[in-house]
Image: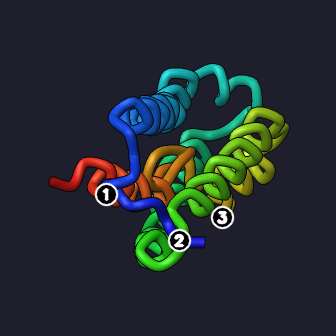
Amino acid sequence: MTEVTAHHITPNYRRHLLGLMMLCQIFNYLDRQLPAILLPSIKKDLLLTDTQLGFITGLAFAAFYAVVGIPLGRLSDSLSRRKLMTACIGAWSIATAATGMATSFFTMACASSAPTRFMPMPGAWPKSTGSTPSTELAVFHLYAA
């Protein structure tokens, strides 16, 4: 099934899609910022050291983006953006729930650096690696002159 071209989309539909993508980006941003606010509580609850907390919020997160970012960007060029964004949002939701249910350093590290953490949100949805390229390309095609 081919993607709908910008010429066949009504202005109301464009605004609706742009609003949905904006909402996803807002959740993506919050998903990346809230853990920083909650770090003291997470550290206390899971009895984590500063090193463990730094690994979870820094190295594990950055390593995943470095390894997966480019392949997901290429996929967004060759696959259906709708399907890729849907898959990324679903995976992001599962990873977010797994992070919320973490009970130790190991489970928190696995959930935080899981391959499902490409989300979030338009483009590379809930964890942004997979949804950002897709979203940016979708907006370009929706509003191409």
Amino acid type assigned to the residue bearing label 1 in the image: His
Disc on the earlier residue, 3 or 1: 3
Q: Is residue 63 left or right of residue 6?
A: right
Q: CA distance from mark 1 to mark 2?
A: 13 Å
Q: CA distance from mark 2 to mark 3?
A: 27 Å
The residue that label 3 is drawn on is 115
Residue 12 image position (x, y, % from top left) = 39, 30
Q: Is residue 25 left or right of residue 100?
A: left
Disc on the earlier residue, 2 or 3: 2
Helix, strand or loop for disc 1? helix
The residue that label 1 is drawn on is 141
- Front residue of 23 and 52: 23
Residue 75 image position (x, y, % from top left) = 49, 75
Picture layout, residue 105 above or below residue 114: above
Residue 106 image position (x, y, % from top left) = 78, 53
The residue that label 2 is drawn on is 2
Q: Which quarter of the figure is the C terminus placed in?
A: bottom left
